[in-house]
Image (cartoon, grey):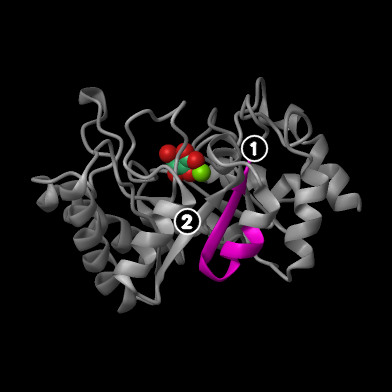
Amino acid sequence: MKFSANLGFLWTDRPLPDAIRAAKAAGFDAVECHWPYEVPADTVKAALAETGLQMLGLNTRRGNVSAGDNGLAALPGREAEARAAIDEAIAYATVIGTPNVHVMAGFAIGEAAHQTFVANLQYACDMAASSGLTILIEPLNKYDAPGYFLLTTDQALRILEEVAAPNLKLMFDCYHVQLMEGDLTHRIKDLLPHIGHIQFASVPDRGPPDHGEINYDHVFGVIAGLGYDAPIGAEYRPTSETAHSLDWLKAQISG
Ligand SMILES: O=C(O)C(=O)[C@H](O)CO
Ligand SMILES: [Mg+2]
């Protein structure tokens, strides 16, 4: 297996370029992040070039976080902001060579939200296609993100079918899917053609993948057995320094 360090949660105690260097030193094959926008894209690009790592993904801005926003793309009436966030994410991703942009839906419910999300995703896929980028959508769990528009892989699949763009894929986060649906390995097998990226963390505490409800030795084996060879994303919250949370990675690297 290859692993990507999610720098939204790992090495958050240091500037993004140093977090990229730390991920390289720890043995990760790639990195990914949430919202890198405060760091100039050229600075991130230089750290990626220095380490030889690729930044696999980044998210669109969430909107006005202090007012409670957690994404904009499914919010009727906020289309202009949502599309500006999509444009910004695609531009940043293009500079740093990132292949995937996660378009965050936000807190919303109902048919108008669905139609808004579909229309904004059509826009995102059109804009991304000219740069060769993939747009991702990610179901989140109802405990961490109550009221989030996109909650299940079935709902995501319906949206993928409706948008029908070849560059729209599912971000399959094992942590969220276990909390909402369970049956992880069947879901991964069934959804594989639609999956653009996989993430993981322990359940229920969102720690490293070495304890809790999910046996990740088994899940990683299933993913590898399916021939999935892209790096998968370690998106967990260390309880102390990230360096102290990496026994699982050392075990995977030493085989
Ligand atoms: O929360 C997650 O699982 C994510 O991957 C998002 O990118 C951050 O909200
Ligand atoms: Mg995730």
Q: Nearer the viewer, residue 179 or 89?
A: 179
On screen, residue 224 versus residue 231, left or right, reads right
Disc 2 + disc 1, Cβ < 8 Å: no
Q: Which residue is mark 2?
A: 57
Cβ at disc 1 under 8 Å from ligand 2: no
Q: Which mark is residue 201?
A: 1
Label 1 SS: loop
Q: Which residues are magenta?
A: 188-201
- Residue 126, compared with residue 244, is above or below; it is below
Quarter of the image for residue 72 reads top left
Cβ at disc 2 under 8 Å from ligand 1: yes
Q: Position of residue 115 (x, y in %)?
A: 19, 56
* Residue drawn at the location 40% of the way across and 77% of the way down: 166
Q: Position of residue 255 (x, y in %)?
A: 91, 53
On screen, residue 251 versus residue 98, left or right, reads right
* Residue drawn at the location 79% of the way across and 40% of the way down: 215
Label 2 SS: strand
Q: Nearer the viewer, residue 233 or 159?
A: 159
